[in-house]
Image: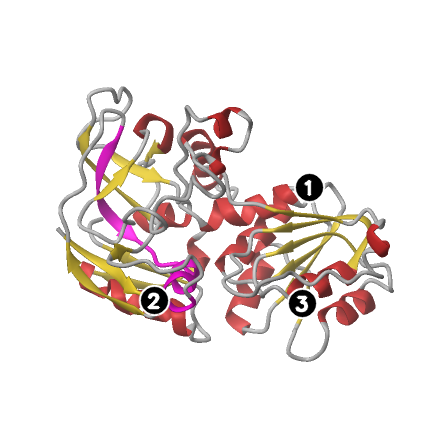
């Protein structure tokens, strides 16, 4: 089969591979639509996961079941499905302990384009099909379904990690697609004021639609100084980091109230250490909590998030700024995520509708 792959750090291209084998609990999927992610950029051009050779990229897709294993009960050939970017092993100790995303070791639930081929192929493999596939609702487009693979659950997980409560003032750093969903998640969880950090007019417009009330431009001065000015020196109750780098934590800790929580869902593609300011962290005793987490995967969560779209509580269409038709456009879409033109939020490549 044909696939678009990371050939080595800094290099991508088309390759031919064997169709993946289907285990007794697994499924083989033919993609209907796929979407590249900034994580693919970190993996290829920053070497964030280390060397990978001839690994098919991608972890955001929806598709049609082409084959199921003998023990799969709930899905059959021909079903139109969604699948999350994180596909845990649901019989693992990690899953039983409440952290399925770390089944098989830290970040082990992240299999696609990490330690097995991803979804940018003519077929892709899904482990534990009954636990990781979800039927694609008839009312949902394939483009919308791709947003549920990673952008929605990751952004919403940032809101969960920050433990946003009714009336909280929330800071969201980075308003790419994950940050936009962090804004939406914070809004749905009852935040009163949402301060978004970003500078591109297109993403600011969409962020406002998702509930952002104020904006900070990191290019015009230190984030923490602008946030403290907006909050009359008080700072924010909660914060979500969905962009930036290892140095971003310093500014956010400075902007966070004592007792506040910071949820990080940003993939830190480079750097050795995270910068935590000693004084503003209360010399270690400021009750400013920092939690970083990989999004949960699985069927149940995906079904629940899908209901937010089908009931009209969440509209992901404003994030989809670039649409392509045809497998041959995967490279073009990926390079858009690498170059990030001003009008880009998220590209989708539709293979079949």
Residue 296 picture location, percent across and down: 49, 38
Residue 66 picture location, percent across and down: 17, 36
> Vertically, is 141 above or below 88?
below
Task: Say whether residue 34 is magenta.
Answer: yes
How many labels sit on residues? 3
Magenta-colored span: 26-46
Circle 2 packing at 10 Å, graded few (<14), some (14-19), many (20+), is: some
The residue tagged 3 is 215
The residue tagged 1 is 163
Question: Given this view, does label 1 or label 2 mark the residue nearer the observer?
Answer: 2
What is the secondary structure assignment of the residue under circle 1? loop
Work out whether residue 327 can be spotted: yes
Which comes sooner in the sequence, label 1 or label 2?
A: 2
Residue 64 image-quadrant placement: top left
Residue 120 picture location, percent across and down: 25, 54
Circle 1 packing at 10 Å, graded few (<14), some (14-19), many (20+), is: some
Task: Say whether residue 293 is magenta.
Answer: no
Which comes sooner in the sequence, label 3 or label 1?
A: 1
> Vertically, is 314 above or below 24?
below
State the mark number for residue 9: 2
Which residue is located at x 20 percent, y 50 percent? 352
- Tell me the distance, in whole angstroms, between the alpha carbons under discs 2 and 3: 36 Å
- Outermost residue toward the bottom? 220
In this image, 170 relative to 331: left or right? Answer: right
Which comes sooner in the sequence, label 2 or label 3?
A: 2
Residue 44 picture location, percent across and down: 36, 64
Which residue is located at x 20 percent, y 33 percent? 22
Which residue is located at x 58 percent, y 63 percent? 272
What is the secondary structure assignment of the residue under circle 3? strand
Circle 3 packing at 10 Å, graded few (<14), some (14-19), many (20+), is: many
């Amino acid at each position: 089969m044909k696939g678009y792959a990371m050939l080595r750090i800094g290099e991508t291209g088309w390759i031919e591979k064997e169709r993946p084998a289907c285990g007794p609990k697994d499924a083989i999927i033919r993609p209907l639509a796929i979407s590249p992610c900034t994580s693919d950029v970190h993996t290829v051009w920053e070497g964030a996961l280390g060397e990978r050779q001839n690994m098919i990229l991608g972890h955001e897709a929806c598709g049609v079941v082409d084959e199921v294993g003998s023990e799969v009960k709930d899905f059959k050939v021909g079903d139109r499905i969604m699948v999350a970017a994180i596909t845990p092993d649901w019989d693992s100790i990690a899953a039983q302990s409440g952290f399925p995303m770390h089944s098989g070791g830290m970040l082990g639930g992240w299999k696609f384009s990490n330690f097995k081929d991803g979804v940018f192929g003519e077929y892709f493999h899904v482990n534990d099909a009954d636990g990781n596939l979800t039927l694609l609702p008839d009312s949902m487009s394939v483009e919308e379904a791709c947003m549920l693979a990673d952008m929605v659950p990751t952004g919403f997980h940032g809101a969960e990690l920050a433990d946003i409560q009714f009336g909280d003032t929330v800071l969201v750093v980075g308003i790419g697609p994950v940050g936009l969903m962090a804004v939406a998640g914070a809004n749905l969880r009852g935040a009163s004021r949402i301060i978004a950090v970003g500078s591109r007019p297109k993403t600011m417009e969409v962020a406002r639609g998702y509930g952002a009330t104020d904006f900070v431009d990191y290019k015009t001065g230190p984030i923490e100084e602008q946030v403290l000015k907006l909050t009359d020196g008080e700072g924010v109750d909660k914060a979500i980091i969905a962009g930036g780098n290892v140095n971003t934590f310093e500014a956010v800790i400075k902007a966070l109230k004592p007792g506040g929580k910071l949820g990080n869902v940003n993939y830190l593609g480079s750097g050795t250490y995270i910068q935590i300011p000693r004084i503003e962290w209360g010399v270690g005793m400021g009750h400013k909590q920092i939690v970083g987490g990989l999004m949960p995967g699985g069927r149940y969560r995906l079904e629940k998030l899908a209901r937010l779209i089908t009931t009209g509580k969440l509209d992901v269409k404003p994030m989809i700024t670039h649409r392509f038709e045809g497998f041959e456009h995967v490279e073009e879409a990926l390079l858009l995520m690498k170059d990030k033109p001003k009008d880009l939020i998220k590209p989708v490549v539709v293979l079949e509708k």
